[in-house]
Amino acid sequence: MFRYCIRRSIFALLVALTVSVATFFLLQVATDPAEAIAGPEADQAVVQQIREQYGFDRPIIVQYASWMAGILKGDFGQSFYWKMPVGKLIADHAPDTIELALSAVLVTIVIAVPLGIFAALRPNTIIDRLALSVAVSAQAIPNFWLGLMFIILFAVMIPLFPVSGDSTWRHFVMPAIVLGASSVPSVMRLTRAGLLDVMGSDYIRTARSKGFRGLNLLVRHALRNALLPVISVLAVQLGHKLNGSFIVESVFAINGLGRLAIDSIFGADIFTVQMLVFVFTLVFVVLTFLADVLNAWLDPRIRLG
Amino acid sequence: MTDATQNQALDAASEDIGEPSPAAALRRRILGHKGLLTGGIIIAVLILLAIFAPLLAPHSPYAQSLPNRLLPPVWVDGGRWTYLLGTDHLGRDYLSRLLYGTRVSLIIGLGAASISCVIGVSMGICAGYFGGRVDQIISYLLTCQLAMPGLLIVTALVFLIGPSLLVVTLVIGATHWTLYLVVSRSAAMQIRQLDYIAAALSIGSNRRQVLFYEVLPNLLNQVIVIFTLEIGVAILAEAALSFLGVGLQPPTPAWGLMIAEGKTAMFFQPWLVILPGAMLFILVIAINLVGDGIRDVTAPEHRN
Amino acid sequence: MGGAFLEVENLSVDIALAHGDLHAVRDVSFSLDKGEALGIVGESGSGKSMTALALMGLLPQTARRTATTLRLGDLDLLHMSERTLSNQVRGERASMIFQEPMTSLNPVYTIGRQLTEAVLLHGKMGRAEATERALFLLEKVGIANAASRLNQYPHQMSGGQRQRVMIAMALMNEPELIIADEPTTALDVTIQAQILQQLAALQREFGMTMILITHDLGVVARTVDKIAVMYGGEIVETGTTSEVFGRPSHPYTRGLLRCIPEPGKGDGRTRLGSIRGVVPSLVGTLTGCTFANRCDVATDACRQAPPPVWPLGPGRMIRCVHADGGVSAAAPPSAADAVSSANPIVDAASPPLLAVEDVRCVFKIRRSVFAKTQFLNAVDGVDLALRHGEVLALVGESGCGKTTLAKILLGLQSVDAGRVMLDGQAITDVNSRERARRIQPIFQDPYSSLNPRRTIGETIGRPLAVHGIGSAPERQREVERVMALVGLPRRFLHRYPNQISGGQRQRVAIARAIIMKPDIVICDEPTSALDVSVQSQILNLLLDLRDELGLTYMIITHDLAVVEYMATRIAVMYLGQIVEEGTKAQIFRAPRHPYTRALLDSVLTIAPGAGVPDTRMGLSFPNPLSLPAGCRFHPRCPEAFGPCSVTAPALRKLQDGVVRCHLYAETPR
């Protein structure tokens, strides 16, 4: 088990590094960062000055190495756009995003998992068809549009929630629902398919022949096997929520990392964007790593080999 | 073999078990699948609207008419028949813009889905069939791609390179290949174990022949399902980019962009936001119905 | 019949399908006294498993069950609610054992927990007592070190051990009725004998009533008292085992018995019989006798009305239009039946067509990311020679390496040591196309050996297309010629595999193999996946083709009856090594190696009342990943002595074969 954890964490680190390298190169290649910073009207002298000031004239590999070295020392760079250390920027904006992401995953679990379980227990009935229709519809709704619809309906027409902002928990209800709704279809289908599979398996038939039935059968024999893969998926979903929240944050004017990312992109603030990508990736691989380890520990076939 | 035993053998072997051919069975299942038919009809209508937009649209989607700005749809007070679905903040006819928007969505959807299909399926088959080192490398690339904050990078790239139809299509296509890879890899791995692959190798087929003649036809169904569903994903991704302002730029009639432009006026003229969103919803839901329908009719054992 | 313990009358099961109702079980009636054992015999699709599931109320949701009577003792099973059924009957008064031990246990719970929950669920005893009972039963079913097993998980045990656990689990609450559905079909033959013996002994000891469901006539002849033969959802004949096997009445029973090769009885002269045709569809309305289309003595009356049931004595009945099953009307065996394929003249002095020299193949296995890497010696120093015209049978159970060896000969697997010579030339020097022209395979599973997206014609003609032989119309003619040779009608050319039966698919596989006119055909379990009545068709076809086309076969199988019918020479493999080799006559008359003897003893021939022989083998199971010191077979060997656990025996050449055993060592003990 210990060796497994070591191997997986090395792997995770490698992935995070690869992604950071790829992004670094991609962003530098996509455009000339000095020109992007200077703006379209600046003349060449200003562009050249910026290039030297931020070290864009060095070879890319050197730039990457010094950036990475900085991170290891704890220096996350300075944002020229926001005129603040990048580290502080991220720390300031993170709490809102974390709160939003966790609530969204909660919404997903509360809606998708029970729906998936009910649909699997009564395949081809009304409940099943309803669940599948919900899945198909939810997959087709653009989440930014859903957000705007929610605002029109529940903030303007029926004033239940505030329109935008992030001061109270109320401000997070609609954004959490909108953000969580986008992954309800896949989690629901996964739960449903997994449980259907398990219910049709031979060991469930054995359990029934021993006298198990109904809720007892479901809880003791079926759910544990069926929900194992769902855990991994939820970890991935949490990761996606964390780094995919910027549309929802835009619509609802929440000051999270997503807003920071968008504004940084528009401001051509390459440093902040690179750092954000790195942080997001790191968080994602840590989450999947934890999910893998949890999975391995819960499944005796992997734990005991 | 004597005649008697040959006849007995023929007798023994010639009974029919009465199963229909795969093509006939497929046809039967397609015609019986309501979701597939509904979605198919909707998509067909939308494709026709896109193709014949110039003929159907009452105005040019770019024609501004400031005296007629922010007119509501005809069924609301103040609406006019000349502008059936109202106008936007520059007085452009919404109906015409919506019709032309169909083209944008379909082109980007098909284009991006095709690019990611080629990338994902070829990598997936190689990983699944060859296994070993090749699989390890490709799986590693897959993990990296999954770990990347996709939409963020796409947004950044499009913004930096410069938004245009081509750039949007390419960037979305180059980042959405993961599902293709996962599905074709797992399918290739399963197929590799089957005896007809061993038989093909035993009769002297080389690797290329095995991949194209034996493996590919058995993957095609699943790939088509993913392709269909990914068209919807690409369309929504483009809409999100346009909404943020990094996708297609004004004055292009793109639904996501129309929602963004209508956002500021949405409390008093909600149709500016409702209508384009509804179009997106209808198109993507029809695509999803068709995709799910194809999955149901080509692999009924996977359903339910 | 009021006194019977288990009474079933007019049981029917219909399954709702998209295009009609499948009449899986039709009008089944039988009764059992307390302590009796009934065997329900039938091929796939006969409805035997559905009958058992119907009794226990475990049918799928789409199934509908109807019956006049379903009574177990004083319980009316027919009208019982699901709740009462689970609380009082299932697992308590009636238990069931299923076929697949590898998937029938929950992988995330320990063995101990799954055993004890059977009693704890029914509230029969406390936890401590339940554990005691679990230990007691584990030992009774033959699991060594029972105490340490309680905390193990299913994946840590072999298939045979898991099935023993299933039996113990079924017995936890002292049920009165036990139903075993193909309990040993998925297991090796030597393990099968041990488990059946144990099951029969337990049934007698605890006085349980047992229903044993199987397709294997030998198993049923030796383990039960009464037998019911099922075909197409109906019971067509019942009686005691000696009655049904000694004087079979129904044409299906008679046909079935003719299809089965009998080791020891065969003299190579009598051709196996077969039953022509396929089982008709049981969907929708059915008219007439279900067996009519395959029956030798069918008349018009048979096709028009459902056949009546004739009682022939106490507990004996037959369902047929003819009161005597048409025995008197049956034609005498024709001359064609009696002629066999002549034994080939094999020139023992000629150089071998295929020679395997000290071949080794090692796999690196890591069962999961936690486990250490282990080495599996799949093939460990094997020498074989195959001469023109021979039929060499490679016999062994799971894990012995025979499949790996087959893959090596077909070029699908590389060797780590040793070499394979094809006609004197190293096979690695022969290019794959040339090798394909000379060696062709026939695989076990007719369902996965044909590409489902290619027509029959395309599949059979593919070898010619790959090698670029002939033009398209010439290839077409070849395909048709070969199809006629294997007995496939021309109209199958444009059919797909899902439109033809299993036996027909196997013929397609054979046609594909012979179209290149190979010298050698390697058959990997060619008939194991087919029904008994179809197996004999394929075996006969293989023998005929050998005579006509001058083929040489290597047949890999675990089925000794097939070996006896087909083979000229036999090689026995165990855990990667050849332990004995010799001519058929020598192996069957005077087997040398204790494993060979155990194998032969494990074959359950149709000998009613003879009981399951005791092979006297030890209970440990062969684990290729942890080979014992010394002789690999010694932990299970009834004749193991001193040197067996210390030194591995070498292969010794005797005048009519080879053997690897200390009992035949050259130096005195």
Image (spheres, coloured by chain):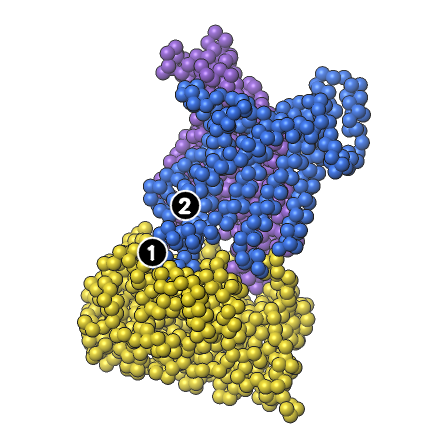
Chain colours: A blue, B purple, C yellow
Residue C627: horizontal and vertical position, in percent?
61, 73
User: Mark 2 — residue?
Assistant: A117
Q: Within the image, what quadrant is residue C301 found in?
A: bottom left
Q: Report how far apart the C-alphas of labels 1 and 2 lie in the structure.
A: 19 Å
Which mark is drawn over residue C295? none
Question: Is C660 in front, or is C193?
Answer: C193
Q: In the image, is residue C661 above or below residue A42? A: below
Query: Does C133 sit left or right of B249 as displayed?
Result: left
Question: Is C32 in front, or is C125?
Answer: C125
Type of amino acid at the residue the image marks with label 2 = Ile
Residue for point 49% across, 57% down: C108
Residue for point 53% across, 53% down: A298
Q: Within the image, what quadrant is residue C609 found in?
A: bottom left
Q: Quadrant of the N terminus of chain C?
A: bottom left
Q: Residue furthest bottom?
A: C668
Residue A226: horizontal and vertical position, in percent?
46, 50
Q: Quadrant of the C terminus of chain C?
A: bottom right
Residue C344: horizontal and vertical position, in percent?
51, 83
